[in-house]
Amino acid sequence: MGTPFEPPVDRTPQELVTELRGLADVHWETVWNGPPLPGQGLDEWCAQFGWTPTQFEYVLNVVTRTGGRMTLNAAGGSWAPVQSLRHWVWGESAASPEENPRVLAEADRVWPLYRDAVSSVFGEPAWEGAWDSTAFPQELGEYEIPQDADRIEEKDPYHMAYWELPTPRGALVSLRVTPALGTADGSDAGAVNMGLRVCPHPPK
């Protein structure tokens, strides 16, 4: 049931709000337990969230009822447990290294628009900062933050915020801007991508 590769499509802040409202009442425990193998059971499992499976060869890709595309990731290409749900939000690229400052400036411009879009659904973030912020988290669920020296040198994450959802098992929603290698130091034509991720809240 594979589909040809399609480049991700940027979402507007309002489209992101609509998408997140569809996730606000999701039973995350069911998501984390993972779907059944492909077949009628998978279709029914996705349907309870308003999703339609589109590809499940290595990861499970779904289309939401509002037209958004999300990817469910599990360890080693297995089906369960689900480690995270990811959603492409926005991206910008440079044609040459000389354009990298413009790309980073555009990321600075749009960041508060998307951050505020997420906050309008989930409330104020538990933490927010940029690549040069102090007290940067060392990890966020399955996502390990680069060491301070690497983060500052590569400006990665360029921007990041996360929200803690009050669910029985807990869920973390993170929004971050990630620059491609060569973007920060101008060694290559750069790019920045913004993505949203939901993962189980790590045990405290």
Image (cartoon, rainbow, N blue to C red):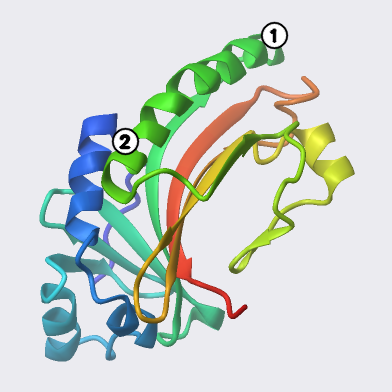
Residue that carries the numbered disc 2 in the rendered image: 117
Which quadrant holds the N terminus? bottom left
| Earlier sequence position, callout 1 versus callout 2 | 1
Q: Nearer the viewer, residue 134 or 64?
A: 134
Crowding near the residue tagged with mark 1, few <14, some 14–19, many ≥20 C-alpha atoms within 10 Å:
some
Q: Nearer the viewer, residue 103 or 147?
A: 147
Circle 2: residue type: Ala
- Kindly tell me whether residue 179 is visible in this rendering: no
Q: Estimate the x, y position of residue 13 in percent, counting from the top left.
A: 29, 31
- Kindly tell me whether residue 18 is visible in this rendering: yes
Q: Residue at x 26, y 60 (%)?
A: 3
Q: Is residue 84 above or below residue 7?
A: below
Circle 1: residue type: Glu
Q: Horizontal placement of 46 versus 96: left or right?
A: left
Crowding near the residue tagged with mark 2, few <14, some 14–19, many ≥20 C-alpha atoms within 10 Å:
many
Q: Estimate the x, y position of residue 149 in percent, counting from the top left.
A: 89, 42
Q: Is residue 34 above or below residue 178?
A: below
Residue that carries the numbered disc 1 in the rendered image: 98
Q: Estimate the x, y position of residue 25 in percent, counting from the top left.
A: 19, 66
Q: Secondary structure at mark 2?
A: helix
Which quadrant holds the C terminus? bottom right
